[in-house]
Amino acid sequence: MTQDINYTTKTKQLIDNLKSVCANYGLGNDGNEFKIISQVFLYKFLNDKFRYEVKKKREELGQDLEEDLLMDLLDENVPRLKPHQQLDYLHNIQNTDDFAKTFDDTLRDISLENAQVFSIKSFSGAKDKLFDELSQFITDPSQRDAFCRALINKLFEFSFEESFEDYFDEKYDFFKDIFEYLIKDYNSDSGGKYAEYYTPNAVARIIAQILVPDQNVKQARCYDPSVGSGSLLMSLAHQIGEDKCTIYSEDISQKSSTMLRLNLILNNLTHSIPNVIKTNTIAEPFYLGKQKFDYIVSNPPFKLDFSDFRDDLEADRFKERFFAGIPNIPKSKKESMAIYLLFIQHIMHSLDDKGKAAIVVPTGFITAQSGIEKKIRERLVERGWLRGVVSMPSNIFASTGTNVSVLFIDKEAGKEQIILMDASKLGETVKEGKNQRTVLTKAEEAKIVETFNTKEAVEDLSVVISAEEIKAKNYSFSAGQYFEVKIEYVEITPEEFAEKMNGFETELQQLFTESADLEKQILENLKKLKYE
């Protein structure tokens, strides 16, 4: 945990230093600032990952091989950097003429030479570049050399000291916090406009441990159709084993795709980078019809305007996927459109025959009395796909006050033992800036996971019920509606009963008397009213 804190603190410090450089050259809060910071950040990690793997390979072989031969022996997923492309070299030659051009050319060559492994595809199949010509974002050519020198110097100053190499073997669940920190300045609407929310680490861990209660999975295809930074997929991959799963993802956000790529590199999942697709998952799904998945995790956008392509979804080719229907466009507040209902249907359609899924949904979904929500719940119950639901504490997301639940789908769940859990009373409230957030303790996380996986009924926490019982409650997935209503009985003597009844009679008599007085006063006041 100390290493995690050290890593996070130092990384945030690097981000702040890079922001400072951008600000000093007139790019503070500029539309290109995010590109500059994220791409420079990526170069730093490619550089350090390469150095780490080279050192490890030399120690493994016990000899100092020539550079070209050593490159051939490295794993195919390790970035390749030539000596003149490394950070040390650029730092040493920073005072040469046209350094900005050298800097841009270096990043361009790294991008081209590593495109096969590290590029992200769009829906059309076109691959993105790892790096832009960053110096060109400075409009004054005379400042470009100095700008690139400043960036290189900030990267060169950044060090994790002796413990740095350990991080390449760590599980980077905490990287989600770094991602959120990096882009918080570029999302002033707290996720509302661009639907960029971040799944808390506790929720991600709970989901992974419920979906994969043991690590006996041989090989798995894991998918997130609204991936963001990938925190849900990272936790799932760690639970399964990085070498036993292949990651697939889709997201409309270029920022998310860029940061997910970084996350995959950090988490020993580089082999899955070619499966990162930038696309509109609802309107232009890349994997639909091509691939089904063993595990799907998703924290989809709850509110997002999709009116531009809503009518296109009415086409016959979408009807099988969106079996429950497509939300209508509200007359006002288009950003309130319940796009998450489309993601749930997309996920159900994308599961393999034995597939499992976990979806973060607004808690209102689990009790809606009609409409698309109810149709989805009916299908899950009727087909025996509902494994259970966990209703989370309020404010578990710092950036939104929406109450959330996690819907667990398992195509082999059956209809007899469905577990519904109300964890809303768990956790403790902490303050994060202007927001309050509920944080679960490790013990509470473990309690949720164990209770769910063992299908244990715990008073005021969980119930285990059948599909028939759910039907009888109008397909409600709320645990609270199934809790036993308890009435406490207290034994009293006949004398005590008579005394209580006398007390009630006296109190009622007083109320009746007061009522009569009030009626009399009202009538008298009415008589005094005159027409003017």
Image (cartoon, rainbow, N blue to C red):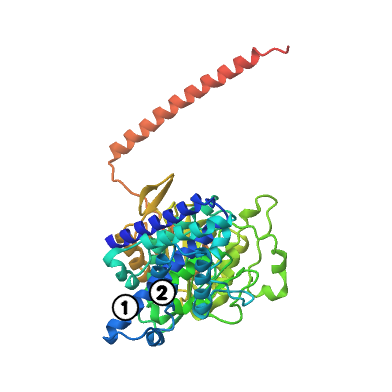
Residue that mark 1 sits on: 55
Q: Amino acid at mark 2?
A: Ala
Q: Residue at x 28, y 67 (%)?
A: 163
Quarter that holds the C terminus: top right
- Residue 77 position (above or below residue 487): below
Secondary element at tag 2: helix
In the picture, the disc for residue 237 is: 2
Residue 205 drawn at (x, y percent): 38, 66
Count of numbered marks:
2
User: Would you identify the image quadrant in which residue 120 lies?
Assistant: bottom right
**What residue occupies the far front of the structure in this picture?**
97
Secondary element at tag 1: helix
| Mark 1 crowd level (few <14, some 14–19, many ≥20, 10 Å Cα) | few
Evaluate whether residue 416 shows in this view: yes
Q: Nearer the viewer, residue 78 or 374?
A: 78
Whether residue 393 sits left or right of residue 322 in the image: it is left
Tag 1 or tag 2, which sits nearer the N-term? Answer: 1
